[in-house]
Image (cartoon, grey):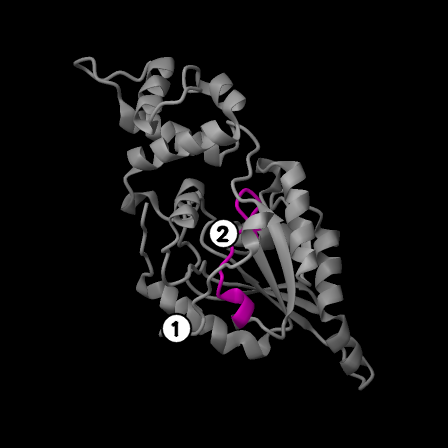
């Protein structure tokens, strides 16, 4: 699955991030714990160089807990503060502690000059990774708009958490070329790319094949008849048979079946699954110097 998608508002969001960096003390990046590499923007390392960084592996309740622990350790080995998190009920104090630690040097330097520094935090990530839900969780109220599809936040939004802590919500930002088929496919599985620009039946077939390799028992328990070495199209038809998705004329309603498997995977109803492995981190290509934006 080859996807090249970089609409105009993505380029605008990228410029907005760059223009506001001078206002920022700490960057909090959210990735999806089910695919921390695929959902991490490879441009961010260069873009936020010199800033305090906090990595939050969000939606950890949907991922394999043991693999999430390995991912947290992998980010920490790269010098980043990291924490698994659930936006709907995560430990706000643990996140605040990481932010304070990342900003401590600058805050202390200004304190010695008699200045009480307001820590300004930029919250970043790709579309649909849960940034707005995270900010609402930290703020304790619905301060920013939230939806289950990518592309809702189109401009920066400042949210005051305490007198000395402010968060900036930013639009979801993909990188210019989704030319790695594996990452593109996993982004699509998770809903970070709008389904309206994809063939959902092909996507569901690919997802069934991947889940059969990762969690065959859970897949079989959920649908029945799909834990076999067969092409994704055959697996999708068997899923339709197990659910009774039949069209007039006797054909399987594969469109409905595709929608069901995608929705149930994204909701964590099939299994707690992590698609990315920490060993994949080496050699990730970035586009910071050659994207022309």
**Under tag 2, what secondary structure?**
loop
- Assign the N terminus to one quadrant of the image: top left
The spot of residue 216 in percent (x, y) is 50, 24
Q: Quadrant of residue 152 in the image?
A: bottom left
Residue in view at x 20 percent, y 13 percent: 250
Disc nearer the start of the sequence (2/1): 2
Q: Marks 2 and 1, how far apart in space?
A: 20 Å
The correct choice, above or below, for 194 with respect to 163 in the image is above
Q: Nearer the viewer, residue 34 or 164?
A: 34
Q: Which residue is mark 1?
A: 290
Q: Main secondary structure of the magenta part?
A: loop
Question: Which is more foreground, mark 2 or mark 1?
Answer: 1
Residue at 54% of width from left, 50% of height from top? 280
Name the spot of residue 44 as percent of width and height, x first.
Answer: 52, 66
Q: Alpha-carbon neighbours of circle 1 within 10 Å: few (<14), some, or many (≥20)?
A: few
Identify the element where label 1 is drawn.
loop
Q: Residue at x 35, y 64 (%)?
A: 9
Quarter occupied by the C terminus: bottom left
Give percent across and percent down for residue 20: 52, 75
- Regarding residue 141, the answer to whether it shows in the image is no
Q: Is residue 44 above or below residue 262?
A: below
Instruction: State which quadrant residue 13 falls in.
Output: bottom left
Residue range in magenta is 31-46
Crowding near the residue tagged with mark 2, few <14, some 14–19, many ≥20 C-alpha atoms within 10 Å:
many
Residue for badge 2: 39
Magenta stretch holds residue 35: yes
Horizontal side, residue 93 vs residue 251: left or right:
right
């Amino acid at each position: 699955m080859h996807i090249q998608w970089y609409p105009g508002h993505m380029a605008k969001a990228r410029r907005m991030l760059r223009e506001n960096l001078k206002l920022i003390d700490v960057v909090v990046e959210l990735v999806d714990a089910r695919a921390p590499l695929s959902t991490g923007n490879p441009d961010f390392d260069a873009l936020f160089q010199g800033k305090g960084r906090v990595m939050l592996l969000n939606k950890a309740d949907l991922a394999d807990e043991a693999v999430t622990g390995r991912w947290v350790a992998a980010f920490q080995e790269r010098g980043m503060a990291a924490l698994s998190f659930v936006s709907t009920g995560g430990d706000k104090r643990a996140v605040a502690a990481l932010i304070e630690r990342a900003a401590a040097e600058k805050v202390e330097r200004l304190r010695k000059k008699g200045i009480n520094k307001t820590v300004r935090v930029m919250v970043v990530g790709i579309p649909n990774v849960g940034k707005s839900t995270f900010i609402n969780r930290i703020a304790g109220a619905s301060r920013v708009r939230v939806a289950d599809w990518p592309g809702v936040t189109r401009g920066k939004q400042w949210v005051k958490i305490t007198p000395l802590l402010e968060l900036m919500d930013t639009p979801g930002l993909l990188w210019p070329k989704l030319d790695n088929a594996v990452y593109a496919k996993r982004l699509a599985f998770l809903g970070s790319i709008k389904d309206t620009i994809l063939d959902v039946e092909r996507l569901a077939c690919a997802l069934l094949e991947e889940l059969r390799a990762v969690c065959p028992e859970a897949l079989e328990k959920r649908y029945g008849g799909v834990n076999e070495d067969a092409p994704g199209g055959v697996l999708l038809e068997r899923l339709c048979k197990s659910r009774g998705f039949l069209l007039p004329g006797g054909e399987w309603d594969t469109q409905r079946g595709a929608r069901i498997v995608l929705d149930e995977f994204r909701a964590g109803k099939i299994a707690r699954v992590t698609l990315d492995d920490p060993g994949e981190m080496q050699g990730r290509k970035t586009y910071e110097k050659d994207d022309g934006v």
